[in-house]
Every structure is written in C-alpha cells, then in structure tokens.
C-alpha cells in the first residue's frame, strides 16, 4: 500500500496497492495512480521531489519485504521525499 500520508491518505483514502517486489518503474507508475501525485511535482512554488530517489527507495523496501518471507508487515512511515533525496524516518516490521 502506498500513499502520500496525512490528509490525502487518512481522510481522502488516496492510496494505491501492488504486490512486492516493485521495480523503480513500477513504483513510479504506482505513485502516478494517486490522485495527489501532482504534489510530488511541485506546487505553489515548491520544488519537485527527487522522484528517482523516491522510486528507488520504494523498490528497495519492497525487495526487502519480498526477499524475507518471515516479514508479515513492513511499514516505513514517514518516508521523507525532498528535492535532494529520500529518507525513511521510522520503520515498523512485524514478523509472522
């Protein structure tokens, strides 16, 4: 499950789903399915986020989840995407 977080995810339920693992291209396509995806490209004078870093990070997270069947859930929240890169600020892993 992928969403931009905050109001877009919690109130508007703007999320997209895919099975892991994803390639960076598939991650970009998944992000593009979000109604709020235009926020990633910069609005109201804000710069666009580094989509290459974001999609690469999403791909790596899904690869880790898929490579370890003992992981029942893996959540990186928040995943901070900026114009200069992407960084996971917190993560939760549930072993099954």
Image: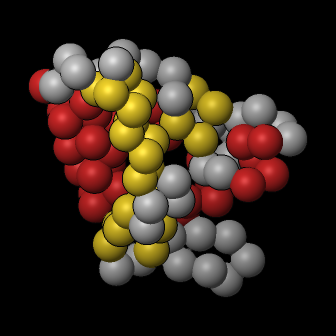
Number of callouts:
0
Q: Would residue 3 be found to the left or right of residue 89 on screen?
A: right
Q: Quadrant of the C terminus?
A: top left
- In the rendered image, residue 20, in percent from the top left (x then y), is placed at 30, 22
**Residue shown at 73% from the left, 54% from the top:** 6
- In the rendered image, residue 15, in percent from the top left (x then y), is placed at 64, 32
Q: Residue at the left extreme?
A: 67
**Residue shown at 21% from the left, 43% from the top:** 60
- In the rendered image, residue 59, in percent from the top left (x then y), is placed at 25, 40
Q: Is residue 55 above or below residue 94?
A: below
Q: Is residue 57 above or below residue 84?
A: above
Which residue occupies the foreground of this view, 18 or 41? 18
Q: Residue at the front extreme?
A: 96
**Residue 63 visible:** yes
Q: Would residue 7 be found to the left or right of residue 23 on screen?
A: right
Q: Would residue 32 be found to the left or right of residue 56 on screen?
A: right
Q: Is residue 42 above or below residue 95?
A: below
**Residue shown at 35% from the left, 56% from the top:** 54
**Residue shown at 45% from the left, 74% from the top:** 82
């Amino acid at each position: 499950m992928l969403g931009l977080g905050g109001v877009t995810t919690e109130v508007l339920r703007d999320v997209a789903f895919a099975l892991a693992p994803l390639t960076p291209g598939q991650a970009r396509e998944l992000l593009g399915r979000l109604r709020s995806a235009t926020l990633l490209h910069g609005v109201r004078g804000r710069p666009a986020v580094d989509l290459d870093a974001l999609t690469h990070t999403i791909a790596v997270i899904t690869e880790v989840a898929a490579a370890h069947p003992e992981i029942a859930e893996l959540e990186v929240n928040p995943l901070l995407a900026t114009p200069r890169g992407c960084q996971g600020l917190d993560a939760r892993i549930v072993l099954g």
